[in-house]
Amino acid sequence: MSINYRIVVNVLGLLLLFNGFFMTLCLPVSVYFNPDDIVPMAFSIAVTFGTGMAAWVLTRSSEKPNIRKREGFLIVSFGWLVMSLSGVLPYIMSGSVVSFTDAFFETLSGYTTTGASIITDLTIIPKDILFWRSMTQWIGGMGIIVLAVAILPILGIGGMQLFGAESPGLKTDKLAPKIRDTAKRLWLVYVGLTFAEFVLLKIAGMSWFDAMNHALTTMATGGFSTFNTSAAEFSPAIQYIITLFMFLAGTSFTLMYLGLVGNFKKVLQNEEFKFYAGITIVVTLGVALVVASVSDGDFEKAFRDSLFQVVSVITSTGFVSADYTSWTPFITMVFFILMFFGGSAGSTAGGVKIVRHIILVKNSILELKRQLHPSAIIPVRLNGRAVDPSITYNVVAFIMTYIIIFAFGSVIMTMFGVDLLTAMGSVATSLGNIGPGIGSVGPVDNFAWLPSGAKWFLAILMLIGRLELFTVLILFTPYFWRRH
């Protein structure tokens, strides 16, 4: 069967309507902080709503078609591009970002929750644009597609293929018989934690505006801040609060939901969560000891900065409380390695994901046993259950593809005149949706100085990384477009 482009355009129109709705939430900020200049945001809302409504209305059908896999891949991949193209409007119309390349880079960095920025001075950016910048990360955090899935069944459109293509991780864990109810429960956790962090940050001394922005970008593991100095601007209490919620955002939302409803046994028995928490603690203590030995001896600050940066990088959030590349070359290498870990599957974090590393290591160890007992069937086990061999193959293929893209991407970046260290850092941070990297795109630098071609290339890597590689790469195969 051929691809149903009508349903693809219809859902893309619906996504634009969602985008217009979230832009509308920025309008009160425009009125409050800049009442004399609300035209840029109002115009952006009108164009986004108008385009989305036209696409949705003109492609509506009385039938109730189901989204198959191929339509799902197209909607997810092009959905992020369409959302980003409409998301550039506030930047361009307000004059906050003049170059379309820079505006698209900033917007896609937001939706993919990468946090890489081309804005060199946040103090001159209007408050409503800063709020929209944070909102793009919050939308992309759990995924606008998951939100759409909660609504599509009401419109008579099945959304399982969308949810499976967009949700980060190995597979989709359904919390309810209907996928719509699963999406709603995940979003309930997402919204609830965002509000909880907002309240705590406000109590700790943040202004309501800064608290809201940082709550939005923390739970999205995005890392956009309203200050040039990022989290280094704030008190120790605020940094600890942000650290806690970064850690939670890097935890599987399905697991958090089970914990919230009282199923603590499921949480404590989860191997991925135990490894995630364990490696965070071990690496933090190791880094803190090194930092304390080369600093002024303030162990509390060394521990706080180490904990904050370890959690920030492993969850791909990208907030900065200190320049970890200035500590020691060894520590810089540790953080570079952490960029390839990622948080838990089913979280808003980017990267490879912890569970894939667990399965890869277990499978590698079992391969040694299979060499001694070639006839034996020894399955990989996770959480006490055998892992389907197809999942193991997928994990191996994913990690190999990830490494190949990183290697070739680093080479391509050097073709733009970028030094090798910066090339590797920019590719690793873009593919893992982290934000700050190493080299000249480190914690105290940004991406504004890169040539336009390099920015477009990194933007592509952000999208590929956010959508778990294969969702985008499959579009470049002849088989995908062939009639079946």
Image (cartoon, rainbow, N blue to C red):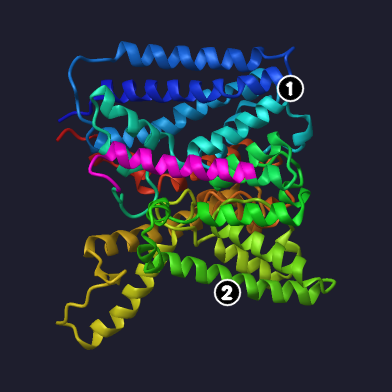
User: Where the C terminus falls, by quadrant?
Assistant: top left
* Left or right for 370, reference 470: left
Secondary element at image label 1: helix
**Disc 2 residue type (three-letter):** Val
The spot of residue 414 in percent (x, y) is 61, 52
Magenta residues: mostly which secondary structure?
Answer: helix
Neighbourhood count class around disc 2 (C-alpha, 10 Å): few under 14, some 14–19, many 20 upward:
few
Residue 358, image x, y percentages:
39, 69
Look at 38% across and 73% down and name the residue there.
361
Residue 209 sits inside the magenta stretch: no
**Which dot marks residue 282?**
2
In x, y percent, where is residue 451?
A: 65, 39
| Circle 2: element type | helix
Q: Which mark is residue 201?
A: none
User: Residue 33, which numbered label?
Assistant: 1
In the image: residue 285, left or right of residue 11? right
Q: Nearer the viewer, mark 2 or mark 1?
A: 1
**Residue 458 showing in the rendered view:** no
Taking 196 as reference, is 333 above or below it?
below
Towards the viewer: 301 or 73:
301
The front one of 351 and 447 is 351
Q: Quadrant of residue 42?
A: top right
Q: Which residues are magenta?
A: 175-199
Q: Residue furthest right?
A: 296
Q: How crowded is the residue under tag 1: few (<14 C-alpha within 10 Å), some, or many (20+)?
A: few
Horizontally, residue 433 falls left or right of residue 11, namely: right
